């Protein structure tokens, strides 16, 4: 009986503590769509990505052409010539693969470029959210755009427009 009463008090205390906390929501997709610098950075990344992909595609196409030529001429080539041609095709395919890794790999140029363009914008948004949360006493600010666990939230607790205003966007 004593354990039940203690457990009941613990639940009541947790409920009172939880209700005293203030929460807010932001919609990061909405915020990012309303920041022109983010849109420009995204377009810049797309342009660079398309350029680099074209370079990789050109080398891959060259490797395919070399392979097709090798196949059509293989009957006329000596074993030594076949070996040289096969090695040349493999080297070209490897070159394309290495270039693709250099540009698009986990530590590649695109990752570094994205980080250099997007991180300052994201940091600025984070700092604005933190300032608003500190000023208004929010214990937690959730992102409604990325959290699928939020089924419903009152628009009254969405501070996305405040964040945009703090950043200087209307």
Image (cartoon, helix red, strand yellow):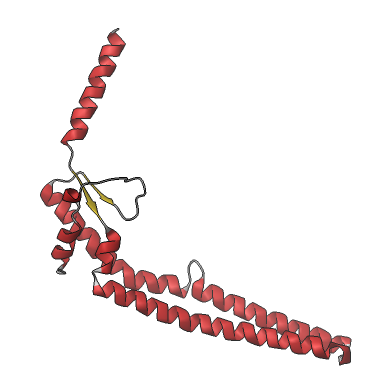
Q: Residue 33: which quarter of the image?
A: bottom left
**Residue at the limit of the structure toward the left, as seen here:** 135
Q: Residue 73: x, y in percent?
A: 82, 91
The C terminus lies in quadrant: bottom left
Q: Is residue 7 above or below residue 21?
A: above
The residue drawn where x is 86% and y is 91% is 77
The answer, for residue 64, to whether it is visible in the render is yes
Q: Residue 84: x, y in percent?
A: 78, 86
Q: Is residue 23 above or below residue 84?
A: above
The N terminus lies in quadrant: top left
Q: Is residue 54 above or below residue 151?
A: below
Q: Residue 133: x, y in percent?
A: 17, 51
The residue drawn where x is 26% and y is 13% is 5
Q: Residue 59: which quarter of the image?
A: bottom right
The answer, for residue 123, to whether it is visible in the render is no
Q: Is residue 120 or residue 18 the one in the foreground?
A: 18
Q: Is residue 159 above or below residue 113?
A: above
Q: Is residue 149 or residue 8 the one in the foreground?
A: 149
């Amino acid at each position: 009986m004593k354990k039940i009463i203690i457990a009941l008090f613990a639940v009541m205390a947790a409920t009172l503590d939880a209700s005293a906390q203030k929460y807010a929501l932001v919609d990061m997709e909405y915020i990012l769509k309303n920041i022109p610098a983010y849109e420009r950075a995204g377009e810049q990344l797309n342009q660079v990505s398309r350029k680099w992909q074209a370079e990789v595609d050109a080398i891959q196409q060259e490797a395919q052409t070399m392979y097709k030529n090798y196949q059509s001429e293989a009957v006329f080539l000596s074993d030594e010539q076949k070996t040289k041609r096969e090695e040349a095709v493999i080297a070209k395919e490897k070159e394309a693969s290495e270039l693709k890794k250099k540009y698009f790999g986990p530590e590649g140029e695109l990752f570094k470029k994205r980080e250099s363009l997007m991180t300052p914008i994201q940091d600025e948004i984070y700092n604005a959210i933190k300032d608003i949360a500190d000023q208004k006493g929010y214990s937690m600010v959730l992102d409604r755009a990325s959290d699928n666990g939020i089924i419903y939230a009152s628009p009254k607790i969405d501070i996305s427009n405040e964040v945009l205003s703090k950043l200087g966007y209307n």
